[in-house]
Amino acid sequence: MSQCIATYRIHDDHADFRKKAESIAVGMTVGSWTELPQAKRESLKKHLGEVYAVEIHESQDGQPGGRYADIRIAYPDINFSRDIPALLVTVFGKISMDGRIKLMSLNLSDDFLTGFPGPKFGIEGVRQQLGVFDRPLLMSIFKSVIGLNADELREQFIRQARGGVDLIKDDEILFENELTPIATRVKLCMQAAAETELETGKKLLYAANLTGRTSGLREQALRAIDAGANALLFNVLSYGYDVLQELSSDPEISVPIAAHPALAGALYPSPHYGIAAPVLLGQLMRLAGADLVLFPSPYGSVTMPRDENLAIRDELHKADMGVKRSMPVPSAGIHPGLVPKIIRDFGLDVVVNAGGGIHGHPMGTEAGGRAFVQAIQAAIDRTPLTDYAAAHPELKAALELWGGEA
Amino acid sequence: MSQCIATYRIHDDHADFRKKAESIAVGMTVGSWTELPQAKRESLKKHLGEVYAVEIHESQDGQPGGRYADIRIAYPDINFSRDIPALLVTVFGKISMDGRIKLMSLNLSDDFLTGFPGPKFGIEGVRQQLGVFDRPLLMSIFKSVIGLNADELREQFIRQARGGVDLIKDDEILFENELTPIATRVKLCMQAAAETELETGKKLLYAANLTGRTSGLREQALRAIDAGANALLFNVLSYGYDVLQELSSDPEISVPIAAHPALAGALYPSPHYGIAAPVLLGQLMRLAGADLVLFPSPYGSVTMPRDENLAIRDELHKADMGVKRSMPVPSAGIHPGLVPKIIRDFGLDVVVNAGGGIHGHPMGTEAGGRAFVQAIQAAIDRTPLTDYAAAHPELKAALELWGGEA
């Protein structure tokens, strides 16, 4: 019998965790069990949830709040349809409201996974778009774009492109507006990208932010693609994973999609409630078809613990999901000095993504991009950044401002 | 200048909360300010967020974790489009990941609210559908329906209907399945409802659960309505508020929609993270067009503090939102003895909603419904339940099992 297994962490100083596990297994599936007649049990057995494991951790120091259990429940696939809303309602719908309970992980069955085409491009596809196969990619973020007119936007785009980045993404808070509506800004940015490519010889993906009403997203994406867009940015959690899946699996939406983690902090950071980051920003984003996934890095100002970051990486990179792999994009607080650490943590299949670390460079945005290009080159050559910086003033200035390798 | 105001609660033992507030106001809007030239400031002023208030609460006992501030930031409406995804990304996108921060409330401008038609029926519309104007409505929940065949489902429906309930809702974990696909179960339930109405003289709304892929929801709703559905149930948070709004504002979806709170527990209960229940399950559900909104009651097993419940009620009931009012449906752990308390807390514009409190009645499901009908009658007559129970054996049995008024 094919099943998906959910692991919950439940904090409770007094609960009978085994009883609790049984009540979840029954309550979230057939509703009642022990009181059923034998014949009914026979017919319902294939729908009944199953307690897979109960691992109780007693409070180390006897302090209240320290006792918890990791409880694993198997849900028969026959109970729910092959979509993320059905999965989430099944494994964490009602039960999310019942005490201090956090959804820690999901083991999805091969059968369930058949419902998901996954990323259209994935790591290899994005690399092919760019013609870059042997190093981390470099992404730059538009900054302070609200209120910019088309000329100002173009100017900022060119400064970023000249720095040598591979991808430029919209600010996620840039919605449809009179000054720079999506088709306008895509046209002018792609035009600028083409001009810059003549100078630098580098291809560039520009991820335009899809916004507005759900029913308009597809048409907006097609308009952006018509205007030349070669990537899209999407605030997945404000719409729902299934909306991302609709977009990513649409045959006409023929460009990579980058998933932004806006709102994710409402769900993952509490130890007691919510959905763990590797599920929220790893597994489900990839399942829904994100080619690139942004999440808070463990290095910067908006942080996430390193082990959670690496668990997100594993969900995006691992081979056994039956869908293409997604590019991890650890973000926030990234400066050139962190590049060796990023590669150590994520390998080469990672996007080095910077906003302030590029625009805030003392020699300007263009130099900011170059400092990252230099740091990446040094790191893959296994040359210490400080050595490489001796002949590269942009990297040198960056290291002086933000520090180097730890 | 029209603005929407967000209130955050930020826990931090050491932060300079005024500086933090400034950094949110600037960082979530124009990106930078103090370093801008004067001319640029002039042109960007209308986009700049504004610190409305900073209310600091020092830790009472000096304990770590006790210090927090309530910070109010005004976001110019000009920055974002008139949809809930844009609102949420603007006020709680990136900032949700920046430390212990919870979104407590939203004051939405009249201008922003013009984008939202709100509930199609609302409290008055739902009452008109039922012809019931002077008392709380009574809803009953299908129980243990996974694995039931059409005959068993019909039988359970009839038992609930004969008990005298006004609404019957699907179990939220019932997805499309071979035994009881939506059109089949709507047909058989509405047929059963018509038959029961001949006996009881009571109209009945049956809320069929909309499930599956986002792009199929509209068609599924229309199929259900074609089959006779006179209400729908929707797991809003697994799809996103905007998907509810698409459904509720669709002219062809001509029946009330009940919003289920599945997954809400991942977002509201933490004191440090997430989105407060009155926003999550009150304001935004109503704005997105839910005619009825289910949420955990303060009375039962799956609980929510009473003040949060009453704040949800206020968001659903209050007059100044420019859209129809929504019916609050406090749920979980409801039994007949609680009816006077529910009316005291919510007034008459409330749905008394029971699952176990109906199906678990010692005299059976039908009697379970009757016990509630009796309790509601007693409460609006201001007759003590125990007095009324003397001549009403179903209520008497319920009070004996579950207890009476506090």
Image (cartoon, coloured by chain):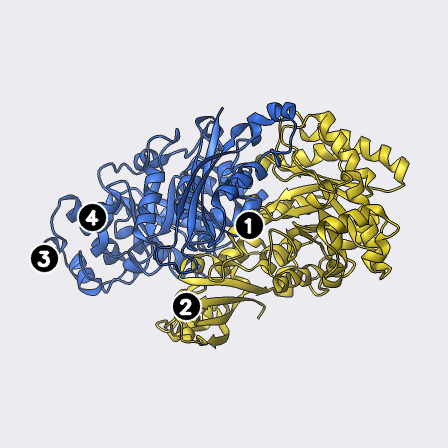
Chain colours: A blue, B yellow
Q: Which residue is mark 1?
A: A98
| Viewer-side label of 2, 3 | 2
Tell me which amino acid carries mark 2: Gly
Real-space CA distance between mark 4 and mark 1, rounded to the nearest whole angstrom = 47 Å
Q: Which mark is residue A376?
A: 4
**Dot 4: element:** helix
Q: Nearer the viewer, residue A324 or B236?
A: B236
**Dot 1: element:** loop
Q: Quadrant of residue B298?
A: bottom right
Position of residue B302 relative to residue A35, above or below, is below
User: Which label's residue is closer to the chain start, 4 or 1?
Assistant: 1
Q: Which residue is mark 2?
A: B65
Chain where mark 1 sits: A
Q: Which mark is residue B374?
A: none
Q: What is the number of callouts on the image?
A: 4
Position of residue A279 relative to residue A14, above or below, is above
